[in-house]
C-alpha cells in the first residue's frame, strides 16, 4: 500500500497484486473470440523455450466450452474510446489496471513451461493514443522474444490508427496479427463505436496483407529472412448487436477472405455487458448462439468446401435455417444434383454431400483407386451415413430405397434427430419452432 | 497349421514377432501375433514364443520405411502403441497387403482392406490421444526445479510426447510419468530424452513442489475461471472437448484447497 499526494487531496491507492491484475485483465479480454494457435510450424532452436505446431494445440477448455490455447489478456483495460458494446469503454466504472512488459513476459514464460498455454494473445485498451499503446505492445513482445527468448506462439492485436512503421515492426515479432472489424457494416460501426471508422480498421489490414505478401517473396529469395506474421491475420465481428442479416455478414466475411487474404473471420454472439439506447434491449434469451454457430458452419463451407456466399443465402432469403445446417439446407434446395455416386463423382461434388466432410471426402477419393467402396466402408471413413444416405449411391445403389423429394428427406432428417449443437441446446436457448425468427427478439429500441 | 507368435507388448516385442512371422513365409491366415498374457487359445494352432531382439525390430522398421514409405510407418508406429490386443495381426496383415500392391507406399489409402482399416483406426486413436495430451499435460515444478508431469493415457504415448517436449523445453530438466504403463520419459537439460521402464519409484519425491509452483497454479486456476463467459456456460460442450479422464492430472481441475497466495 502506498500513498500518493496529488495537490491537496490525498488518494489512497492499493498496489494491485499479480493475482488481481491477471483477474481484471483476463476478465476484460474474455470477449475476444480467437484463441487459435494454428498456422505456424516452427521448431525450437535449442537456445530458448518454445515451438509451434501447424495444427495448433488446445490446452484446456473453460466452463463455457471454449478452448483455452493462449494466455489471453489485455495489456491494459484503460481506454480513451467509448465503444458502446465494450466492457472497457471509458464511461464504464470498472476497476482499471495495466501490466508492465516484464510482468507479461514472466507470466507467459512461467505458464508456458508448465505447459498451461501455447503462447500469448495480447490485446489492449487504448492508452493515451493508438501509437503509444502500440509502442507498449511492441516493447512487451520485443522483450519476450529477445530477452526471454520465447519461441512459442504470439497473437497480437493491431491497434487501428497506429503508425505503419509500428505495425510493420510488431509483425516481425508476432505469429498472427488481427484487427477487429467489430461490426459488419460501416453504419453500425458509426453508431456503436463512434471513435472508430471503417477506414481506420481496413487500413492496417491492407498494410499487413501487403507486407505479408512482400515478405513471402523475400523468403523465396532468402530462406532465412525474418518472417512477417507467418500465421496470417484474422478478424472478428460482433453478431446480433446490429440489424445486419446473415447474408450481409457472410458476404462481408467472403470479401475479407478474397480481398484481404484473411486466415480466419471470427463471429462473436453479442453479450450485453452495457446498457445503452443504441444496443438491442436485453430479451433474457442469452446471446444468439445458434446464429453464431450457423455462421461458423457457413464460414467453413466458404473456406474448405468451395461454396460461394451467394449459393448459401440471397437477398430474398437472407437468414440461415434454424433446423438445418447451411450445407444440408443447400442440398435440399438442389436435389437435382443428387444422388452422387461415391465411386465415381469428383471430389468437389463429394464435398457438397451432407454428412461427408473434407477429410472423409479425401479418404474416399484415395481409397476408391484401390477398390470399390460400399456403405460399410464409408462408415469407417467417418461419413455420417444417417445424413448422407439420401444423397449418395454406392455402385449405383442407394442404401435404402428413398425418394428424391425435399419434404420427404427433410422429414426423415428431422426424425433421426438433426442434432442441434450442444452449445445451443445447453445454453438455455429458447425452444425452437418453425416460425421463429433467427435474429434476436428485441431489435433496435 | 496356424502358428501364433507370442511377444511382449512393446515396440521391440511386436516388431520381433512380425519378423518371425514374416520369415516363416506363411500365408496371412496361417500366422498371427498375440501379446504375452493376452493370448486367446485356439484349436489347431501352434504357439511359439518369440525371441525378442533389437536387431529384428530394426530390420522390420527398415523394411516398412523402405517399402511402405514414411506415412505408413507413421501409422504403424502409432498403431503399435495402442492398447488393442489385435494390433500385431493388423500390422502384419497390412504389411502383407502392401506386398500385393504395385506401389506399396499407397497402402494406407487402401482403406477398404479390413487390416489396413484397422491400422488406420488404431493409429488415428493413438495419435489423437497423443495430440490431446500435448495440450492437457501439466508440469509441476518440484523443489529442485525439475518439471514433473503425470499422465494416465490409454495408449503408450510417451514416445510421441517426448520429442515434442524436447523441442519445446530444451533447457529444462523434465520428466513425464505414465502411471498406467509405469513408464517414464526423462529429459536432462541440453540432452536427448530417454525412455525408462518401471524401475524403482519413490512417490514421495514428487510430493515436494516448489513455493513458486503454488503461486502459478493459483494464477492459472483463476485465469481459467475468469476467462469463461457466464452467459455462455456449457459444461457439456466442455466435457466433449475435455473428457473427465484427463482432468485428475490437470492443475486447473485439481482441488488444491490452498489459500490464495
Image (cartoon, coloured by chain):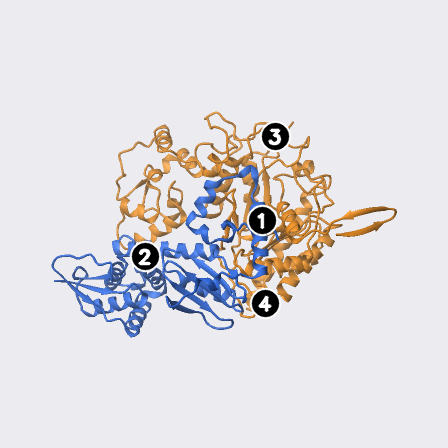
* Residue at 69% from the left image edge and 50% from the top image edge: A76
Horizontal side, residue A201 vs residue A217: left or right: right
Taking depth in this image into account, of B50 and A172 the one nearest to the observer is B50
Marks 1/2 same chain: yes
The tint chain A carries is orange
Residue at the far front: name it.
B204
Chain to which the residue tagged by mark 3 belongs: A
User: Mark 4 to mark 3: distance in Å?
Assistant: 51 Å
User: In the rendered view, would you say B253 is above or below A283?
Assistant: below
Q: Position of residue B60 (x, y in %)?
A: 29, 69
Q: Quadrant location of residue B61?
A: bottom left
Would you say residue A141 is visible in this rendering? yes
The CA distance from mark 3 to mark 2 is 52 Å
* Residue appearing at x 51%, y 43% in the figure: A63
- Residue wearing tag 1: B222
Co-location on one chain, circles 3 and 2: no
**Earlier sequence position, callout 4 versus callout 3:** 4
In the depicted structure, whether residue B51 falls above or below residue A205: below
Badge 4 density bin: few <14, some 14–19, many ≥20, Cα 10 Å: few
Residue named by callout 4: A225
Is residue B107 rendered to the left or right of residue A196? left
Tag 2 residue: B83
How far apart are labels 1 and 2 at the CA level? 36 Å
Nearest the viewer among B126 and A343 is B126
Amino acid at each position: 500500500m502506498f500513498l500518493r499526494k496529488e495537490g491537496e487531496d490525498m488518494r489512497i491507492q492499493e498496489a494491485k497484486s499479480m493475482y488481481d491484475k491477471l483477474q481484471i485483465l483476463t476478465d476484460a479480454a474474455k470477449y475476444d473470440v480467437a484463441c487459435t494457435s494454428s498456422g505456424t510450424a516452427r521448431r525450437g532452436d535449442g537456445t530458448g523455450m518454445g515451438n509451434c505446431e501447424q495444427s495448433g494445440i488446445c490446452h484446456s477448455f473453460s466452463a463455457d466450452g471454449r478452448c483455452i490455447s493462449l494466455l489471453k489478456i489485455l495489456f491494459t483495460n484503460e481506454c480513451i474510446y467509448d465503444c458502446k458494446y465494450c466492457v472497457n469503454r471509458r464511461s464504464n466504472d470498472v476497476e482499471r489496471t495495466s501490466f508492465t512488459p516484464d510482468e507479461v513476459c514472466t507470466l507467459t514464460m512461467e505458464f508456458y513451461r508448465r505447459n498451461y498455454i501455447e503462447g500469448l494473445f495480447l490485446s489492449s485498451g487504448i492508452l493515451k493514443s493508438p501509437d503509444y499503446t502500440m509502442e507498449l505492445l511492441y516493447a512487451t513482445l520485443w522483450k519476450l522474444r529477445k530477452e526471454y527468448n520465447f519461441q512459442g506462439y504470439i497473437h497480437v492485436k493491431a491497434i487501428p490508427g497506429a503508425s505503419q512503421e509500428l505495425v510493420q515492426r510488431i509483425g516481425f515479432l508476432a505469429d498472427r496479427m488481427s484487427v477487429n472489424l467489430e461490426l459488419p457494416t460501416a453504419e453500425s460501426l458509426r453508431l456503436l463505436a463512434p471513435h472508430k471508422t471503417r477506414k481506420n480498421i481496413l487500413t492496417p489490414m491492407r498494410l499487413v496483407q501487403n507486407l505479408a505478401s512482400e515478405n513471402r517473396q523475400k523468403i523465396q529469395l532468402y530462406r532465412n529472412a525474418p518472417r512477417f506474421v507467418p500465421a496470417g491475420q484474422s478478424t472478428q465481428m460482433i453478431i446480433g448487436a446490429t440489424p445486419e442479416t446473415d447474408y450481409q455478414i457472410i458476404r462481408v466475411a467472403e470479401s475479407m477472405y478474397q480481398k484481404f487474404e484473411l486466415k480466419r473471420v471470427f463471429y462473436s454472439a453479442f453479450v450485453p455487458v452495457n446498457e445503452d439506447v443504441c444496443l438491442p434491449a436485453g430479451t433474457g434469451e442469452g446471446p444468439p448462439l445458434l446464429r453464431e454457430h450457423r455462421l461458423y458452419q457457413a464460414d467453413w463451407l466458404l473456406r474448405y468446401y468451395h461454396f460461394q456466399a451467394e449459393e448459401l443465402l440471397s437477398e430474398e432469403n437472407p437468414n440461415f435455417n434454424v433446423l438445418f445446417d447451411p450445407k444440408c439446407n443447400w442440398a435440399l434446395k438442389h436435389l437435382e444434383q443428387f444422388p452422387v455416386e461415391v465411386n465415381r463423382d469428383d471430389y468437389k461434388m463429394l464435398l457438397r454431400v451432407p454428412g461427408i466432410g473434407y477429410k472423409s471426402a479425401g479418404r474416399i477419393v484415395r481409397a476408391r483407386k484401390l477398390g470399390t467402396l460400399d456403405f460399410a466402408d464409408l462408415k469407417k471413413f467417418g461419413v455420417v451415413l444417417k445424413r448422407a444416405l439420401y444423397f449418395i449411391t454406392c455402385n449405383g445403389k442407394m442404401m435404402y430405397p428413398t425418394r428424391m423429394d425435399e419434404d420427404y428427406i427433410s422429414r426423415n432428417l428431422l426424425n433421426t434427430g438433426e442434432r442441434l449443437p450442444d452449445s445451443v441446446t445447453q445454453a438455455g436457448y429458447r425452444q425452437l419452432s418453425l416460425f421463429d425468427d433467427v435474429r434476436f427478439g428485441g431489435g433496435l429500441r | 497349421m496356424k502358428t501364433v507368435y507370442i511377444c511382449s507388448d512393446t515396440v521391440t516385442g511386436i516388431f520381433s514377432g512380425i519378423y518371425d512371422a514374416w520369415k516363416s513365409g506363411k500365408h496371412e491366415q496361417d500366422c498371427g501375433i498375440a501379446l504375452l498374457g493376452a493370448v486367446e487359445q485356439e484349436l489347431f494352432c501352434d504357439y511359439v514364443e518369440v525371441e525378442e531382439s533389437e536387431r529384428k525390430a530394426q530390420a522390420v522398421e527398415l523394411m516398412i520405411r523402405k517399402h511402405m514409405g514414411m506415412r505408413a510407418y507413421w501409422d504403424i508406429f502409432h498403431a503399435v502403441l495402442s492398447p488393442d490386443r489385435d494390433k500385431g495381426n493388423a500390422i502384419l496383415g497390412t504389411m502383407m497387403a502392401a506386398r500385393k500392391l504395385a506401389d506399396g507406399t499407397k497402402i494406407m489409402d487402401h482403406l477398404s482392406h479390413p487390416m489396413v482399416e484397422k491400422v488406420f483406426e488404431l493409429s488415428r486413436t493413438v495419435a489423437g490421444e497423443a495430440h490431446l495430451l500435448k495440450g492437457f499435460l501439466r508440469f509441476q515444478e518440484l523443489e529442485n526445479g525439475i518439471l514433473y508431469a503425470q499422465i494416465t493415457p490409454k495408449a503408450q504415448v510417451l514416445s510421441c510426447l517426448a520429442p515434442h517436449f524436447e523441442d519445446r523445453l530444451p533447457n529444462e530438466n523434465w520428466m513425464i510419468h505414465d502411471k498406467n504403463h509405469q513408464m517414464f520419459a526423462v529429459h536432462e537439460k541440453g540432452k536427448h530424452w530417454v525412455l525408462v521402464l518401471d524401475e524403482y519409484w519413490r512417490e514421495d519425491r514428487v510430493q515436494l513442489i516448489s513455493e513458486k509452483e503454488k503461486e502459478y497454479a493459483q494464477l492459472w486456476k483463476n485465469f481459467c475461471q475468469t476467462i469463461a463467459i457466464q452467459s455462455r456456460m456449457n459444461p457439456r460442450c466442455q466435457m466433449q472437448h475435455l473428457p473427465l479422464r484427463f482432468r485428475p492430472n490437470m492443475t486447473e481441475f485439481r482441488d488444491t484447497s490452498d489459500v490464495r497466495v
